[in-house]
Image (spheres, grey):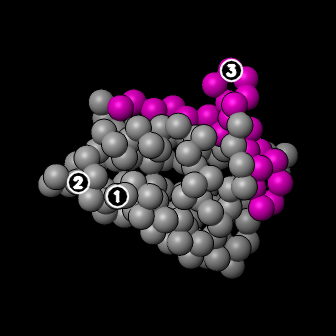
Amino acid sequence: MKTVARSKTKSVDIEAAPAKVYTFLADPMNWPRYAVVNLRSVSPGRDGWFKALTKFGEGEIKVDGKEEFGLLDHVWRDPQATWKVYARVVPNGAGSTFLITLFQPTVMTDPQFDHAMKEMDIEMAKLKEIVET
């Protein structure tokens, strides 16, 4: 039995100040604008949770952010699984780098996780495009 999940860290350099990138990402209502492969819609929920509709069905997101450290960790839960995603915006010269580490959920096969990580590349490019304009 595995005790450590597979993980993948994605990053994107963005020509925008960390505060701008953080503000955009700290609001899950913005996420469908860049997470174009996976997210269909996000709406306010209860107790800090946001309802989300994905290509796989319904779930919920809750952000545990700390702007002073650029932390944008969040929890995802749906009927199949719950997992934590670790994310951060860090200064990079006059711009920023956004990093996100994802762990393979037990409900995902290796090929499914690999495919999801390729899709993340599309979403990271979209995030860069949106925040830079």
Q: Which residue is mark 1?
A: 132
Which residue ends up furthest to the front in the rendered image? 133
- Quarter containing the N terminus: bottom right
Position in image of residue 96 (x %, y %): 27, 53
Determine the residue positioned at 45% across, 32% down.
65
Does 54 lie within the magenta span?
A: yes
CB contact under 8 Å: marks 2 and 1:
no
Give the residues in magenta: 44-67
Where residue 95 is drawn, which disc sits there?
2
CB contact under 8 Å: marks 1 and 3:
no
Q: Which residue is mark 3?
A: 47
* Helix, strand or loop status at disc 2: strand
Looking at the rendered structure, the kind of residue marked 3 is Asp
Where residue 79 is drawn, which disc sits there?
none
State whether residue 11 appears in this view.
no
Position in image of residue 41 (x %, y %): 71, 49
Instruction: Label the magenta part by its dominant secondary structure.
Output: strand
